[in-house]
Image (cartoon, rainbow, N blue to C red):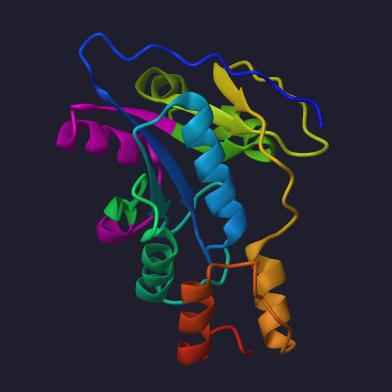
Amino acid sequence: MTQIKVQVQPLSSDNKKRIGLLGGTFNPIHNGHLLIAEQVRSQLNLDKVLFMPDNMPPHVDQKEAIDAKKRLKMVQLAVMDNKHFGVEELELKRGGVSYTYDTLKELQLLHPENEYYFIIGGDMVAYLPKWYRIDELVKMVKFVGVQRPGYRQQSQYPVLWVDVPKFDISSSLIRQKIAQGGSIKYLVPDAVAEYIRKEGLYRE
């Protein structure tokens, strides 16, 4: 695997905390999400990575997701053992369509002490020109691109690229395995698997 070296940036002169944001439907959250977050945190020397469940993503086809409270609970269970991970509930509390521009604007007002790094997959980098108020957004946040097979590391916007070990897993695959009665051990954290079992999620 080709290693892409990321030069760690020095801490901001005003000593702002370096916070990563990993958004997603998390339907359900899985070990691939955790792997990405830890690799980005380590390589970019971030203070923390916050997992941010979205309410209604504007840039993808509408997905059928389970109740937001249950998706949030699974995220909370998945990150509870890592002191460098946390959960940001802003988009769920706000409701409606989750535009990243609106989210970052609100987060900066609430937490001016933070400098944000927004983590996206390499496939999403190609869609950045279509993002709501992208020209303003790139001045508010640093985008971190995670490599994906078949996508070039190229964008008209500034993107920090991070190389993450390939972990071919998706939430849709997990839902399919559950519906078929298959095992999801080692695909999701044990606490998440137990919650899914107790709640009877994704059985149909």
Q: From what the image shows, is residue 184 above or below residue 108?
A: below
Question: Is residue 109 a member of the stretch shown in magenta?
Answer: yes
- 55 vs 193, left or right, is left
Whether residue 61 is visible, yes or no, is no
Residue 15, image x and y in percent? 22, 17
Figure disc tally = 0
- 160 vs 22, left or right, is right
Whether residue 83 is visible, yes or no, is yes
Residue placed most toward the observer, 96 or 195: 195
- 112 vs 174, left or right, is left
Query: For the point 56% across and 21% down, which residue is it?
Result: 160
Q: In which quarter of the image is residue 2?
A: top right
Question: Is residue 186 a member of the stretch shown in magenta?
Answer: no
Query: For the point 34% across and 49% down, which residue is it?
Result: 83
Q: What segment carries the magenta color?
A: 92-117
Query: For the point 40% across and 75% down, which residue is it?
Result: 70
Q: Quadrant of residue 68?
A: bottom left
Residue placed most toward the observer, 61 or 40: 40
